[in-house]
Amino acid sequence: MSDSSPARAEALVLDVWCELQCPDCRSALGDVGALRDRYGDRLDVRLRHFPLEKHKHAFAAAQAAEEALEQGKGWPYVEAVLGRVEELDRKGEPFLVEIARELGLDAEEFDTALIDGRHILIVDADQAEGKAIGVTGTPTYVIGGERLDGGKSQEGLRERIEEIADRLLAGR
């Protein structure tokens, strides 16, 4: 999921392999926000879906995030869901539609998208690509060809991403 525009075609890409029912991904939101603030249009932060089997609503949440992107509020939706993972655990798919309604999105279209599975191929493709490059947990970051696993600990990862980004941006 990327809110990229053509103007950002030259931006450095940071892929964030994420799962919307993952407490560690919620913890990573602060770092992702700080990176977006620091680099602005020079860094294209792309959410990549990697739903884990241990979280039964994660696959639906990934599809819902794609519907939110289609309706123009991808990142706000992701942040809202991650901020309330416990509610997603308890309420399941109706919670995903509830968040859409809270954000002023077309909740009926959300419900339909979850039923008809129109975003399944995007989620499947992300998950397959993640597995192919060695992603095993979330969050995992990929920048400049380097994979950084945040599933065990977030400590020091933002600084490492900044080092890589600064080096790559200086070389452009």
Image: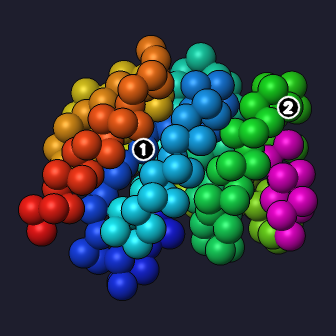
Asked whether the residues under the numbered discs 1 and 2 touch, taking CB atoms below 8 Å apart as contact, a structural biologist would say no
Q: Judging from the image, what secondary structure is the residue with disc 2 in?
A: helix
The tag on residue 16 is 1
**Which quadrant holds residue 116?**
bottom right
Relative height, residue 59 to residue 98 (above, below): above
The stretch in magenta equals 95-104
Q: For the residue carrying disc 1, how many other residues have a C-alpha within 10 Å: few (<14), some (14-19), or many (20+)?
A: many
Q: Is residue 10 left or right of residue 77?
A: left
Q: Position of residue 90 (x, y in %)?
A: 86, 25
Amino acid at circle 2: Glu
Residue that badge 2 annotates: 87
Please say whether residue 101 is one of the residues in the magenta stretch: yes
Residue at image location 55% in from the left, 35% down from the top: 28
Q: Is residue 14 left or right of residue 106?
A: left
Q: Position of residue 165 (x, y in %)?
A: 26, 52
Please say whether residue 54 is one of the residues in the magenta stretch: no
**Visible in this render: residue 161?**
yes
Residue at image location 61% in from the left, 30% down from the top: 27
Q: Position of residue 71 (x, y in %)?
A: 68, 73
Amino acid at circle 1: Val
Q: Judging from the image, what secondary structure is the residue with disc 1 in?
A: strand
Q: Main secondary structure of the magenta part?
A: helix
**Which quadrant holds residue 172?**
bottom left
Residue at image location 34% in from the left, 52% down from the top: 14
**Visible in this render: residue 127?**
no
Q: Nearer the viewer, residue 41 or 19?
A: 41
